[in-house]
Amino acid sequence: MSALRRYPSALVLAIILILYLAAALTTLHSWLAAGFVITGDAPHYLVITRGILIDHTLEQTVPYREAFEQGLFLGSGITEPPSPANTHAYLGPHGLFNIHNFGLPLLLVVPYALQGVLGVQVFLILVGGIGIVVFWKISGVFTPMRWVRALSVAAVGLAMPLLSSSSQIFPDIPAGVLCLVGLYWLITVQKHRSLWREVLMGLAVGYLPLLQIKFAAPAAVLAVALALAIARRRPNATRARRWRSTAVIVVPFVSLLGLVFAFNLYAFSNLTGPYEAGAFRLAPVTLMVFVGLAIDQNQGFLFQSPLAFLGLVGVGMMLAWRRNVTIAGVLVFFSLIVPNVLLSNQYGGYSFIGRFQYPAALVFGVATLFVLSRIAERSRVLFAAVCAAGIAVQALFWAFYTFSPPFLESAARLFYNPNADPGLLNYSVFFYPLQNALAALYNDQWAFGYLPNYVWAAVVVVLLAAGVLLGIRRHILKRVWMPVAAVLAAGVLGAALISVSPTVTRVYDTSGLIVEQGTPTADGVSVSAATGQTAGPVTAGPITLMRAGTYTVSLTYSSTAPPTTLVGTWQPAPADADALPERPLAGTNGEPVTVSQTVVLTNAVPRLLQLRTTWNGVGQLTVLNATYVVPSR
């Protein structure tokens, strides 16, 4: 600690940035070496980027046609002309325009021109590094102690989502970084800066709507808060002069938002862009997602970076420190969360877990930095221990998603939102075998009746209240914190012991299986000599990940052969153990028949559990579906 005092601030920050870049680039290299491919919305952002660079247009017909013809970003085999059916584009009065905003592709043009997709991913990692720099700047407002700043920023910044997701081609982390720039400006608005510096920061805040129209909400909050703060910092100036000084934020925000509106009107005949009926919803599941982005064991920012639980206390303490700044920060946080909650693609669809909270999580890091600075003032030992624990947890997470063979073999499927209920046993990415003790808000059919969700929601409320009390009446908290903590701990333990998530039955028709031969239809996949097939494998799959537990695996099939004739075999084949012995499949006289067996897995990390079917060349065999029954624990 004392050694850090001898080094210049710039050197300390450089060391943290080097650690961040080393970790993030190592993760990217590991994923590329494992053969990970870009998916989800990312290929479509690259199509826009290439269209700007090569075709000099935002109209998407030519960029998508070239991507289809050259097999770029979206794979090969697309022979149809670009249309809304095979792109992420909307056909409007002036052509085909992407539903994704053009702000991120504009930033990616130069990196893509220099080094292609890899250049884009490295550039986005560097953008995450700007977030580290802003964290460092903000920490300097909270404490002058360099070693405290170093440990705080390392604990908050060298963590999810920056380490795990900054290379992903999405606008979420760049949006979070721009919001941090705006908050830093607001916190230090009284600091004298040159005009060009304030114009640059104004452009940073104003750029948010270009990344995605939903980011107009936090941009508006920051613009209003900054305009008011700038107008008040010269109390002796005339009113007209004070309000003219707000042009550094008002003009960029209004101009860039106007540009987005003009483009949306041209491309989609709609100010807000391509959103159609059904894109938003207000239903019980909306509340589930709202809470889940905070406390769900996979999606929630509090569990992706557990040190953020202290940030809940920091929010209340910041209210006593600077109320207006804190209120603005809270409004920015909720303006980042609420639009995502209202979208019908729950938790962001097929993308990384927690993506919808990434920008809000970065903003919340300000409160965590604040409370860490206050802990350091009271106990250096406790502060160092807390930061060390936070860094250690993130190091374990990082090692798992960077080097774990099961994670790499699964092509990062563990990090993607499940497209069906995997069962709580297989849901938790980082916290197995504690999954039953933690909040789980991914299935609205049972999430509202699951006791741990309420216990962890209570933990959040209590920590927020504790922060408020620490800020105004610390002596009250001293008298009650131990019994309150004991009650919450007992609640978490009790909920874990008595709560049982539902047993999940997952049915996979042939669209969810790997068809080795035969033609899949709605009625199954059928093989026979009469239709040209030969003896051998019929189906494999499904591509689903299961961890230690006792599963019931079933196959439903039919065959026109009589029951006395054997037509093939079936066997469960876990990736983490030897395949179970093959079992015979007899004829069924054309009637559907279900055969089942129990499979016991011992792997702690979810691995593939496939079901293989083989035809022996006799008679006819139709595979109808596979069923997995996932236990509750």
Image (spheres, rainbow, N blue to C red):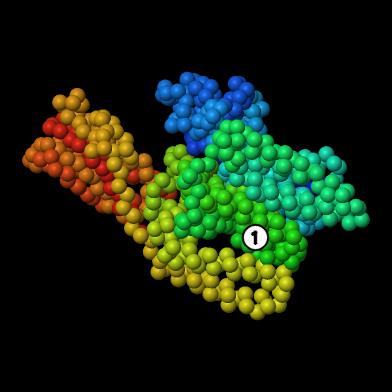
Q: How many marks?
A: 1
Q: Secondary structure at mark 1?
A: helix
Residue 171 vertical placement versus 428 (above, below):
above
Residue 218 vertical placement versus 380 (above, below):
above
Residue 350 vertical placement versus 45 (above, below):
below
Residue that badge 1 annotates? 311
Q: Amino acid at mark 1?
A: Gly
Identity of the residue drawn at 66% across and 75% down? 477
Q: Nearer the viewer, residue 44 or 501?
A: 44
Identity of the residue drawn at 14% across and 38% down? 559
| Residue 123, image quadrant | top right
**Residue 586 placement, left or right of 374:** left
Work out whether residue 264 can be spotted. yes
Instruction: Give coordinates of residue 223: x percent, y percent.
Output: 73, 49
Instruction: Give coordinates of residue 302: x percent, y percent.
Output: 57, 57
Identity of the residue drawn at 18% across and 35% down? 621
Work out whether residue 155 can be spotted. no
Identity of the residue drawn at 29% across and 33% down? 515
Instruction: Give coordinates of residue 153: x percent, y percent.
Output: 70, 51
Q: Nearer the viewer, residue 106 or 402?
A: 106
Residue lying furthest bottom: 479
Residue lying furthest right: 236
**Residue 474 placement, left or right of 397:** right
What is the quadrant of the C terminus in the image? Answer: bottom left
Q: Nearer the viewer, residue 223 or 400?
A: 223
- For label 1, the crowd category at 10 Å Cα-Cα, with few meaning under 14, some 14 to 19 and many 20 or more, is many
What is the quadrant of the N terminus in the image? Answer: bottom right
| Residue 624, image quadrant | top left
Instruction: Give coordinates of residue 631: x percent, y percent.
Output: 33, 57
**Residue 603 placement, left or right of 623:** right
Q: Nearer the viewer, residue 610 or 582?
A: 610
